[in-house]
Amino acid sequence: MLFMGLLPLVVGCSLTSSEVEPKLPTGRISGGNTLVYRAEGLPVVAHNDSSFGTIISSIFGGKGPVSGYLDFTNQLVIHGVDSQNPPAAGQKQHVLHLELPAFQGPGTYALGAPETFYQVSVFNSDKRLDSPLTFYPVSAPGARVTVTQWDAASRHLQGTFSVKLVEQGTGQSVALTDGRFDLILEQ
Amino acid sequence: MMRFRYLLPALLLSLAARAQSAAPLPAPASPGAWGGGIGIGNGLEIHADYLKGHLLLVGRSRYKWWGPQEGPGSSNLLQNFNTRSRQTEVAALAGYGLPVGRGLAYAAAGVGYVAGRELGAYRYTIRSNNFFSNDTHYYAYRSYQAIGVPLEVGLLTPGTKRGLGIGLAFQTNLNPEKSVYCLLLTFWGGQLGASPSGHGN
């Protein structure tokens, strides 16, 4: 009864409260090619998988969300889109296309311009993508990619990146940080 | 939701009728009665209780989880366990117990600590390699701890010969971070589970 009498005096209070962004996954996600980064601090995750839908898609020539290859001039191309996210109105889709000229294995590279780009599209109410905003990298040192591991035999490539990009029309900039890729390059 | 609007009153009436119809037993002289058990509903709890006269003391620990209102993983409560807001509560309550036949109706309030997370905006999905979809969806969230005011009203029916009482409890915890509400089917053991109103008088 005493406690009931004291109840009006008891006022709830907050002890701690913090906003948390989910961590970027580590390693190769679902055993497939992986490209992850933070865009203005928000996580973006693109990866390949071998689910039933993906297998069916590949039969008809569909490419995975993350791919990479070396062209005949030894230019390294890495392409990733977070297409595994379900399309929903207001949801964004991110495309990152990195090109590293004169690839020679592990090391730090400046990104090729204007070949490298980053696009952000928004799904409308019909679950279709609106026209994308396209960003291009700011000149060095704002656009750097570090290849940490390259195995020419297995074509396994790993690396990190941090890139600042600008949209030409509006001048809007975006910082991609904590970038990481882990993929098998196509033959 | 509409189809369940009469569920709570119906359950309470049913439990009250069961309590009323049981033949009352003479109340043994006792300094008080202990009990405890679990609760299952739109949350899970364990509770320990002490009744002396009309004074009821309750200690409870409750866990509740729920999905986002919309977005990936919002459907199918039994999947996507990662895509859930959640709250754990540890609380001590004191209240008033009123015999109803051999059963017990009660109300209690107290102080409780809650810790949990509240999902915010959707961020990304990890697709699995499974034949059937078992994707994991990730959301931003707010992590919190708070002190709040737990409230509980409930009804406990006389127990079986094995000393298992069944009841119904409506619980809430009012706090500045996230107040939650639970309707639980409760199971009581111990002296209270055997005959709640026959003790503690």
Image: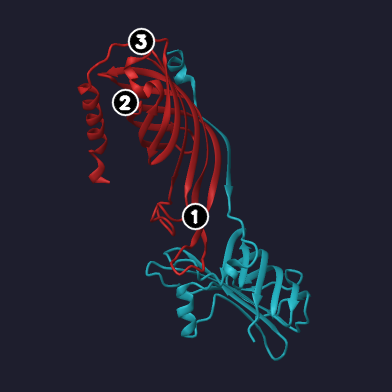
Q: Nearer the viewer, residue A5 or A62?
A: A62
Percent position of residue A149, x then y: 75, 73
Q: Quadrant of the image for the C terminus of chain B?
A: top left
Q: Colour of chain A?
A: cyan
Label 2 CA crowd tier, 10 Å (few <14, some 14–19, many 20+): few
> Sequence order check: which comes first, mark 3 or mark 1?
1
Q: Is residue A31 left or right of residue B43?
A: right
Label 2 or label 1, whichever comes before in sequence order: 1
Residue A12 lies, with reference to residue B117, above or below; the image says: above
The front one of A52 and B150 is A52
Farthest residue, direction front: B161
Please give left or right for residue B148 compared with residue A36 in the image: left
Identify residue type, mark 1.
Answer: Ala
In the image, is residue A165 above or below residue B185?
below
Label 3: chain? B
Depth check, front residue: B37 or A161: B37
Q: Which mark is residue B161?
A: 2
Snapshot quadrant of residue B16? top left
Chain B rendered in what hue? red
Looking at the rendered structure, the kind of residue marked 2 is Lys
Query: Which residue matches tag 3?
Result: B201
Q: Which residue is mark 1?
A: B121
Element marked by disc 2: loop
